[in-house]
Image (cartoon, rainbow, N blue to C red):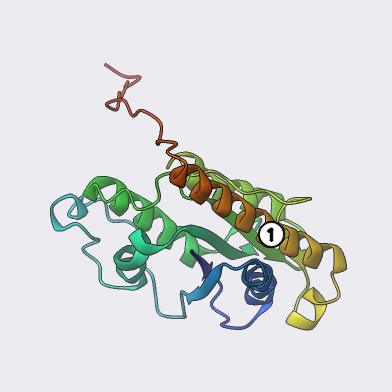
């Protein structure tokens, strides 16, 4: 089993990465393979609403969104990490997740269905809960079980060395990794025991303006 941890910070090994590394180590200690997926510093466009993903099977814009779409089917769980910018998730990961989840939906890939997910946020001081809530909404609209920890998944600090002093934050990350590993093993055991996925209905859309 494998968990992909997405670093939504432009800093390759900054505070967000430091938090994700702790989660990854806890997952690894529990027998789960991990990989950290860096968004990097190249510009990421927001969704242009062209809906080309419906016919192409991927986003019309060529960048890290399609890189993840190509491998998402083979990943068992996801952790998305972001720094806090103006009390919300960073612009790059917001654009990234808008397009990633929209392209997956319209293309019919269903790469995220019933796969566990978690959000991790990093801030110097405040805005963490707003950013945390924002990221979790991608999971709950995609039928992904949200993995929790002993507190909201956040760390504090202006630099990695500060994060390493946030003992409670580090414990939250370790607990998150162990909880995700436990869920993945339970899911695997259930499938092996013959527990089938829930019955799915044809989607109903009700518009509020007629």
Say if residue 8 shows up in the picture.
no
Residue at figure coordinates x 32%, y 48% from the top left: 110
Compared across the picture, whether 73 is left or right of 94 comes to left
| Image spot of residue 131 (x, y percent) | 62, 53
Residue 82 x, y percent position in the rendering? 59, 64
Q: Quadrant of the C terminus?
A: top left
x, y percent for residue 195:
45, 36
The foreground one among 143 and 14 is 143
Identify which residue is drawn at 47% across, 67% down: 92
Which residue is drawn at the image coordinates 36% and 63% (left, top)?
74
The answer to whether 76 is drawn above or below residue 186 in the figure is below
Count the labels in the image: 1
Side of 17 relative to 108 (left or right): right
Q: Secondary structure at mark 1?
A: helix
Q: Return the residue at label 1.
A: 178
- Residue 143 appears left or right of 9: left
Residue sticking out furthest to the left: 55
Image height of 133 relative to 59, above or below: above
- Quarter of the image for residue 66 reads bottom left
Quadrant location of residue 7? bottom right
Q: What residue lies at 62% left-to-right and 63% top-to-bottom?
A: 85
Name the one closer to the observer, 151 or 199: 199
Q: Is residue 154 visible?
A: yes
């Amino acid at each position: 089993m494998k968990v992909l941890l997405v670093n939504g910070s432009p800093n390759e090994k900054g505070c967000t990465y430091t938090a994700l590394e702790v989660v990854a180590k806890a997952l690894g200690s529990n027998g789960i393979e991990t990989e950290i997926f860096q968004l990097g510093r190249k510009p990421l466009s927001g969704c242009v609403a062209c809906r080309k993903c419906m016919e192409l099977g991927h986003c019309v814009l060529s960048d890290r969104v399609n890189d993840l779409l190509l491998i998402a089917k083979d990943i068992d769980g996801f952790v998305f990490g972001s720094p806090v910018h103006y009390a919300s998730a960073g612009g790059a990961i917001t654009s990234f997740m808008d397009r990633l989840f929209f392209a997956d939906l319209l293309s019919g890939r269903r790469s995220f269905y019933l796969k566990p997910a978690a959000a991790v946020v990093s801030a110097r001081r405040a805005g963490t809960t707003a950013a945390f809530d924002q990221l979790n909404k991608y999971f709950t609209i995609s039928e992904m079980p949200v993995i929790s920890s002993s507190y909201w998944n956040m760390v504090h600090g202006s630099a990695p060395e500060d994060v390493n002093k946030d003992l409670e934050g580090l414990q939250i990350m370790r607990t998150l990794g162990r909880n995700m590993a436990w869920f993945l093993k339970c899911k695997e055991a259930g499938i092996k025991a013959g527990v089938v996925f829930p019955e799915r209905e044809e989607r109903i859309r009700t518009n509020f303006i007629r």
